Image: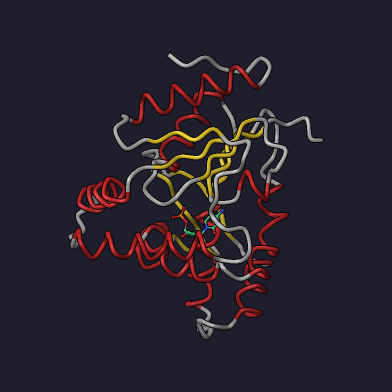
Amino acid sequence: MSTVPVIAIDGPSGSGKGTVSRRVAEALGYHLLDSGALYRLVALAGEEAGLDPDDRDGHAALARSLAAVFTFDEQGNERILLEGNDVTGPVRSERAGAAASRVAAWPSVRQALLERQRAYRRLPGLVADGRDMGSVVFTDAELKVFLTASSEERAHRRHKQLKEKGLSVNLAALSAEIDERDRRDASREVAPLVACEDAVTIDTTSLQVDSVVKKVLALARARIPAPRAEED
Ligand code: DC
């Protein structure tokens, strides 16, 4: 058993995982693992290397040697580098999300990323955001949270995010894409998206981010001895 506490936050796309995980990590002074970004990077690296989209071994090899850096610019915006190149925009695109969901269904790719993800477990603690954080990667996590929201609400949230980025996307098409991605993530044979028996499920459909963050922090305080920071 590791002595480094982990809070696993799993759920489908648009459930609020990313924002909630970041805010919880900030409040506790914990490290953050955005595991979805790793799958997105593998898909992107495959495209850049000109791999056949169905080349499982090629993608697994890339996953093992992925030269990825997660950092922030001077304005505090997230920056993701692949082989030293800024790929933040492409990584966060809907296209990369869909491609990530495809490569993430392959056991060899998941296996290749396993140790890399576990290496994020460092003091004072880790918030791990993904689909299988509680069920596979950190089965002994002190706290497992499963966030859900209705599929309409998730499509609306994603639509709003993209509009804020200046991208115009058709809501119906986006909704269909999200449903397709969920279906693939939940039905794959290895590490499908499921709520573990020992996870606390929070339906965020009609909740503001603040109140979800507060709920998770309250759970964390109850489960993890002496969390380092207090929320204001
Ligand atoms: O959370 P996200 O949208 O960035 O994830 C992109 C895809 O990666 C998602 O559709 C499924 C896959 N994924 C996964 O299989 N396991 C994880 N722990 C995280 C993401």
Q: Position of residue 23 (x, y in %)?
A: 45, 31
Indicate the colouring scheme.
secondary structure
Q: Nearer the viewer, residue 149 or 45?
A: 149
Q: Position of residue 9 (x, y in %)?
A: 53, 40
Q: Position of residue 163 (x, y in %)?
A: 20, 52
Q: Nearer the viewer, residue 181 or 108?
A: 181
Furthest residue in direction right, as rendered: 1
Q: Nearer the viewer, residue 54 or 185?
A: 185
Furthest residue in direction front, as rendered: 197
Residue shown at the point (36%, 48%) measured from the top left: 14
Q: Quadrant of the N terminus?
A: top right
Q: Is residue 202 above or below residue 148?
A: above
Drawn side of residue 6 relative to residue 15, left or right: right
Drawn side of residue 106 relative to residue 186, left or right: right
Q: Is residue 20 above or below residue 108?
A: above
Residue shown at the point (43%, 63%) measured from the top left: 183
Q: Quadrant of the C terminus?
A: top left
Q: Position of residue 12 (x, y in %)?
A: 44, 50
Residue shown at the point (35%, 31%) measured from the top left: 209
- The picture quadrant where one finds residue 6 is top right
Count the labels in the image: 0
